[in-house]
Amino acid sequence: MAESVPSMADSSAAASVQIVYTKRPQDEEPEAYHIRTLASVLASEDAAKEALLYDYNTVASGFYARRHHNKLNKSQV
C-alpha cells in the first residue's frame, strides 16, 4: 500500500514521494529487496537506487522513494 507525500520538487517536474510497506524478506537483506521491488517498477536497478530516499528495516519493512511519472515502466501505468 503506497501513500503520497507532498513532493519538495518543483510541481512542474511531475514527481512525488511514495511510501511503500512490504513484508519483511526472509532470505534477503531488506535494502536489497526494496531496491529489487522498486526496480521492477522503474525498469532498472540504477533508477531504483537513485529514487530510493529511505529504507525502513528496524520496526517496519518498507521504503520511501521519489517517483517521476515519466520514468515509470509502461506496464506499471
Image (cartoon, rainbow, N blue to C red):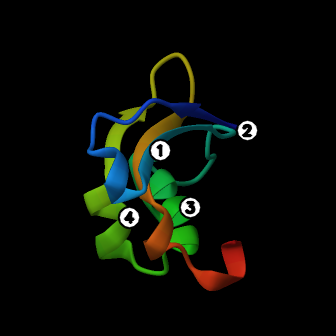
- Between circles 4 and 1, the one closer to the viewer is 4
User: Which residue carries the number 4 mark?
Assistant: 48
Q: Quadrant of the N terminus?
A: top right
Residue name at image x 45 percent, y 45 percent: 16
**Disc 1 element:** helix
Residue 17 lies, with reference to residue 35, above or below; the image says above
Measured Cα–Cα span from mark 3 to mark 2:
13 Å
Sequence-wise, which precedes: disc 4 or disc 3?
3
Q: Which mark is residue 30?
A: 1
Closer to the eye: label 3 or 1: 3
Which residue type does callout 1 highlight?
Answer: Pro
Please tell me whether mark 4 sits on a helix, a strand or a loop.
helix
In terms of depth relative to the viewer, which is nearer, 42 or 68?
A: 68
Real-space CA distance between mark 4 and mark 2, rounded to the nearest whole angstrom:
18 Å
Q: Is residue 58 above or below residue 75?
A: above
Toward the front, the furthest residue is 12
Determine which residue is flagged by label 2. Answer: 1
Q: Could you tell me residue 9's position as x and y percent?
A: 27, 42
